[in-house]
Amino acid sequence: MSANDPRRTRSSYPSPADRRARQKKEEDPDWVPRPLNSFMIFRVEYSRRHAQNNKEGDNPVPEKNLSRQASEAWRKLSDAEKRAYKLRADQMKIEHAKQNPGYRYRP
């Protein structure tokens, strides 16, 4: 994962997605993760922003509540704000296609 990858976190513990990716990679060395969609890019940024605030506060918010808050915040975004994330997701998809020619999603 590159330094500016939106999935990269500063936590000392691997995220569930990182653990899943590591397990998939062990099962199939040719496995490639899907590119993030617009909501997932927003969710990663939202979590990063609020997790930092969460560490500093006296009353930490559980991860599942953070996810719920992120989805509520996403629904409140204007179409223009969502479009910015959509453009970033489209760019990531193009870069993913260049880095992984012939990629096909295999659940």
Image (cartoon, rainbow, N blue to C red):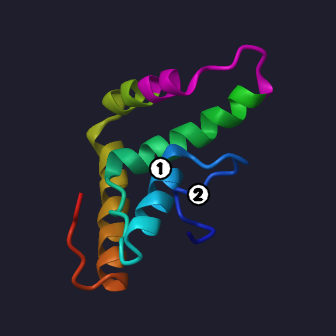
Q: Position of residue 9 (x, y in %)?
A: 63, 52
Q: Are marks 2 and 1 in contact (CB under 8 Å)?
A: no
Dot 2 corresponds to which residue? 8
Does 100 sit above or below residue 75? below
Dot 1 corresponds to which residue? 17
> Magenta residues?
56-69
Q: Nearer the viewer, residue 98 or 81?
A: 98
Label 2 Cα neighbours within 10 Å, binned few <14 / some 14-19 / many ≥20: some
Q: Residue at x 60, y 42 (%)?
A: 48
Q: Position of residue 37 (x, y in %)?
A: 32, 54
Does 21 sit above or below residue 61? below
- Image quarter hosting the C terminus: bottom left
Identify the amino acid type marked 1. Answer: Ala
Helix, strand or loop at label 1? It is: helix
Q: Residue at x 31, y 29 (%)?
A: 75
Q: In the rendered structure, which disc, 2 or 1, sits on the residue that comes first in sequence?
A: 2
Q: Residue at x 38, y 24 (%)?
A: 72
Identify the amino acid type marked 2. Answer: Arg
Label 1 Cα neighbours within 10 Å, binned few <14 / some 14-19 / many ≥20: few
Left or right: 80, with 20 as reference point: left
Does 78 sit above or below residue 101? above
Q: Position of residue 38 (x, y in %)?
A: 33, 51
Magenta stretch contains residue 62: yes
Does 88 sit above or below residue 96? above
Left or right: 29, with 52 as reference point: left
Q: Nearer the viewer, residue 6 or 33?
A: 33
